[in-house]
Amino acid sequence: MSGAGGRGCGSPVPQRAPWSLVAATAAFCLVSATSVWTAGAEPMSREEKQKLGNQVLEMFDHAYGNYMEHAYPADELMPLTCRGRVRGQEPSRGDVDDALGKFSLTLIDSLDTLVVLNKTKEFEDAVRKVLRDVNLDNDVVVSVFETNIRVLGGLLGGHSLAIMLKEKGEYMQWYNDELLQMAKQLGYKLLPAFNTTSGLPYPRINLKFGIRKPEARTGTETDTCTACAGTLILEFAALSRFTGATIFEEYARKALDFLWEKRQRSSNLVGVTINIHTGDWVRKDSGVGAGIDSYYEYLLKAYVLLGDDSFLERFNTHYDAIMRYISQPPLLLDVHIHKPMLNARTWMDALLAFFPGLQVLKGDIRPAIETHEMLYQVIKKHNFLPEAFTTDFRVHWAQHPLRPEFAESTYFLYKATGDPYYLEVGKTLIENLNKYARVPCGFAAMKDVRTGSHEDRMDSFFLAEMFKYLYLLFADKEDIIFDIEDYIFTTEAHLLPLWLSTTNQSISKKNITSEYTELDDSNFDWTCPNTQILFPNDPLYAQSIREPLKNVVDKSCPRGIIRVEESFRSGAKPPLRARDFMATNPEHLEILKKMGAASSIDAEDGLRFMQEMIELSSQQQKEQQLPPRAVQIVSHPFFGRVVLTAGPAQFGLDLSKHKETRGFVASSKPYNGCSELTNPEAVMGKIALIQRGQCMFAEKARNIQNAGAIGGIVIDDNEGSSSDTAPLFQMAGDGKDTDDIKIPMLFLFSKEGSIILDAIREYEEVEVLLSDKAKDRAAILKGKMIPSYIINSNPEMENEEQSSPENDSQNQSDEQVSSSSQEVDLVDQESSEESSLNSHPESLSPADTDNVASISPSEQTSDPTENHETTNLNGECTDLDNQLQEQSETEEDSNPNVSWGKKVQPIDSILADWNEDIEAFEMMEKDEL
């Protein structure tokens, strides 16, 4: 996400100083103040840091090598099936696929990572491949945002380090700005996207045909996200500064200027989605996560790279609003731009994990430490950061596509503090990646952090960012072949040289910021932060901030504690909560009548009540659903490393309450399992494989149970079906009493089931584990004669053991292992999730006779009637509901003027008046992550 500039940190920077002398100094001096801490966490020895750094190098080699071997020149590697992902040849994942342009995305995104990791020979080879093989003139529609940060940024980062290496005189002596010329070609291909009246770019463009032509298949969009339009200035300005062609920087500046003009003036916040033609806000919620995140990042970094103080003024104005409304330490909760005191949602997305790193660069250390520690506690609970989680730290969206933002913030906190605690955090990230995400052909994204199941996906940003930040975290200055402080990191962690601030400065720097707001310069940082102020003379300062948050996940308290308590102390009557509402209570109906009509406070209470009603309805439907289960292949050569997401059954053994079931698999005869089995000896004591169709699931279960099977896996008969494109299913009963079914039953789609069937054909005996979530390999393989690296997740041991002759055959079989894809469309995820939650469990028609209920893999929420706790000043949790009730009773007793109307208005009539607002909330919930 961010970068460091370490020049001149010993002296103040005068206001309105000549920026040709001081670019990057004021905002970025903080990160050079390393090794502040002298106590607290035990210091890590240089030997251990080197060992961890070498482990990062090996992990990168494993990921990059498998991409080059199995996927190149495709855009990305599919690590479970060991092949490349080519646009149009795999099931569509929606907008996620807009990053793919048939331009060898992962290779371009990894160029400067190779240099940071001191792989200069590989870098030179990679540049030659890009120049020889990559075509930027493909008839494919791509995301302007993704193409800019990944491809244009990757080419510019590669060019920046290519000229650096050429100057050193050993490598790249043949290089003559070829990557820069490719970047310029791509820049011109993106420019037609800016052909709007507002200057905001279209979200997508056809690389060959541009915008609005019939053959372009794009150009009809009206909306774009704030980050999509506001995360262009670094790459476009660098392209202008490198080439002298000012048009790129001009277009990116115009887009940023328009977003600044359209901010909500009273709150100084921006929304998530904006109309590119009218400038109207389409999504009026505001946060620091998905849809907005890198807009804020690029304002601060544009100030650093370009020397334009108006960008710093804008950033500080926004930052003040963020800390005033969105920041509820340690949480960062979205709010409404017009009503910033009203939370817009009760969950957070994983992309906000970048924000502590940005706060470090701003110089605001305390909230950075708090939020980072909260996120780390979530990671320790789930091994990875879920795509979204609630304010009480339950999983909201269970996927994890190996995002690097948390590693990024960890790196910058360590740079700022020198606290070895953050080295231990990085060590945990390395261990989790090797233990849970590493597969024979790379690293696989997590389909569900609760079950440990994998997704056939390894995004290019994993190589561009994750390994870069982890290596820099453990590297000493002498471990890097160039001075990293001379560069700024883009949002994709590509490196741009800070000397661009003094090159080709032909852009007019009209400061439009002060035209729209009165700014107090005293609030802005024009000098290097004083580390004695940032870090008081207490070497345990950071630890003292982290300590109260150690149990924040396990002892969670409800959202909005501070605001509720403030209202509580002010003497206001506690608002009606959705969980307490009773339609037969006249007082409650009277409160509903007042909401939105009496005052701004009543209006906020009404909006909050409606939001809670929507969430409560969603929660109640979730409670009727079962979470996904896991099928883990534990026999050779899988050894528990392949985990398939399975649909549960509403009958049979509940794997969440009983010990997992383990056994070898066998196909039943008949394969549909709809009659008495003719091969009972084959399935006796084993887990039977059955094909879906022709009879009820419960009937299949009874037939295999009668034959002696210890469990059953139903494989979908719809060839090619996959959880890539379909929601998970839970198998319903037959409408009769199913208590006689005692064995566990799970459902796999055709693509997942074929993995097991293929394994049977190749290895004959295949053993699986049926459980509620993936089990630790050490526990699974206890007492087995298997390679020790499988248990320990030690890549070095893996290399040693696999290099021996006796393991050659195992290496070959490992390479042949393929696993199921569990891909997820991250765009409009909430929409699909909400659609699943709001539909009744699907029962197939009698003609199909398989009763299947559609479920969502999102986390089950708690009972809405459970007690809620809050934290008092001593850090203890107390019963908030009791406090509010006692306060309410006290107020009623002490205020004789309090009276409640007795006239009862039908609830339908009241709710009918709110239809428009409820629809607005539902639109807000359809978040595009």
Image (spheres, rainbow, N blue to C red):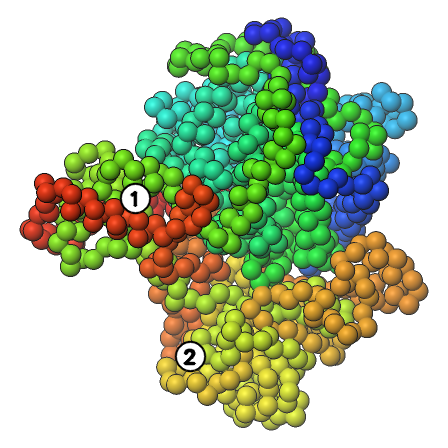
Read off the residue under disc 1. 608
Task: Name the residue: 85% across, 27% down.
Answer: 172
Of the image marks 1 and 2, the number of the one nearer the N terminus: 1
Q: Secondary structure at mark 2?
A: loop
Q: Residue furthest left?
A: 903
Read off the residue under disc 2. 733
One can see residue 548 in this view: yes
In this view, the residue in front, 695 or 714, is 714
Task: Name the residue: 77% across, 48% down.
Answer: 59
In this view, the residue in front, 572 or 472, is 572
Decide if residue 641 is on the left or right side of residue 97: right
Decide if residue 32 is on the left or right side of residue 656: right
Q: Quadrant of residue 160?
A: top right
Q: Secondary structure at mark 1?
A: helix
User: Could you classify mark 1 by the number of other residues whose Cα lies within 10 Å: few (under 14), some (14-19), or many (20 or more)?
Assistant: some
Q: Quadrant of residue 75?
A: top right
Q: Amino acid at mark 2?
A: Gly
Q: Quadrant of the N terminus?
A: top right
In this view, the residue in front, 176 or 367, is 367
Task: Name the residue: 70% across, 44% down.
Answer: 424
Residue 492: horizontal and vertical position, in percent? Answer: 64, 34
Q: Amino acid at mark 1?
A: Arg
Residue 157, placed above or below residue 310: below
Q: How many marks?
A: 2
Residue 910, placed above or below residue 570: below
Task: Name the residue: 23% across, 38% down.
Answer: 572
